[in-house]
Image (spheres, rainbow, N blue to C red):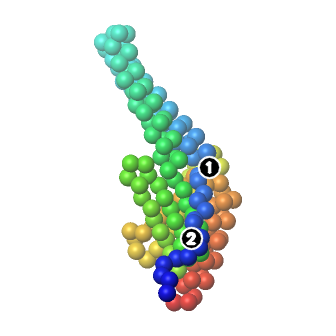
Amino acid sequence: METGTTGETDRPAWAGLPGGLLSLRRLLLVVWTAVLTAATALPLGLLAGAEWAALGAIWLPALVWGWVLLGRNWRSWRYAERADDLLISRGVLWHRETVVPYGRMQLVEVTSGPFERRFGLASVQLHTAAAATDAKIPGLAPDEAERLRDRLTELGEARSAGL
């Protein structure tokens, strides 16, 4: 008598996030770094002299560091649709994987703020009965977000009908 699985195991087909989310986050990083640099350099330049204004450049290493971290974080986000649940994986240092069974979904919504709309992005928010298992997939193309919302809603209704 054999036990265990035989043959090929079903591996999820992971999908990553589009590059628009990375572009948006990096643009925001550059804007905030410029604001902090100006807020540091201008007062120092006016009050202590031009030599002290160069201390505003202290924010440039933070820009480089943030640029690299944003790229690593963006590459870590992925999701997979399986037969009975949705997998969401994210994180570099603290890796987090969320499994949301279709039958437990109560609400699936697509949101898009002003910056996201400008970059052609939308987010899918999944709500379940347990608040701790709510999940979000940011930075999707609006067509993909709507397709995913419709598919998850359809699967959720089919799975919950059997309860």
Label 2: which secondary element? loop
> Is residue 110 shown to the viewer in this render?
no
Crowding near the residue tagged with mark 1, few <14, some 14–19, many ≥20 C-alpha atoms within 10 Å: some
Q: Nearer the viewer, residue 67 or 29?
A: 67
> Is residue 103 shown to the viewer in this render?
yes
Q: Earlier in the sequence, mark 1 or mark 2?
A: 2
Q: Residue at x 45, y 62 (%)?
A: 97
Q: Nearer the viewer, residue 80 or 128?
A: 80
Q: Residue at x 50, y 83 (%)?
A: 2
Query: Residue 135 location in percent, x, y?
Result: 47, 64
Residue type pointed to by label 1: Pro
Camera-nearest label, 1 or 2: 2
Count the numbered circles shown: 2
Q: Residue at x 45, y 30 (%)?
A: 64
Q: In the figure, 160 relative to 47: above or below?
A: below
Query: Residue 136 location in percent, x, y?
Result: 50, 61
> What residue is disc 1 on?
18
Q: Is residue 143 left or right of residue 7?
A: right
Residue type pointed to by label 2: Thr
Query: Residue 37 location in percent, x, y?
Result: 41, 25
Q: Are marks 1 and 2 in contact (CB under 8 Å)?
A: no
Query: Residue 45 location in percent, x, y?
Result: 36, 14
> What residue is disc 2 on?
9
Q: In the figure, 155 relative to 44: above or below?
A: below
Q: Residue furthest front?
A: 1
Q: Nearer the viewer, residue 91 or 59?
A: 91
Q: In the figure, 155 relative to 80: above or below?
A: below
Label 1: which secondary element? loop
Q: Residue at x 58, y 59 (%)?
A: 14
Alpha-carbon span between mark 1 and mark 2 = 28 Å
Crowding near the residue tagged with mark 2, few <14, some 14–19, many ≥20 C-alpha atoms within 10 Å: few
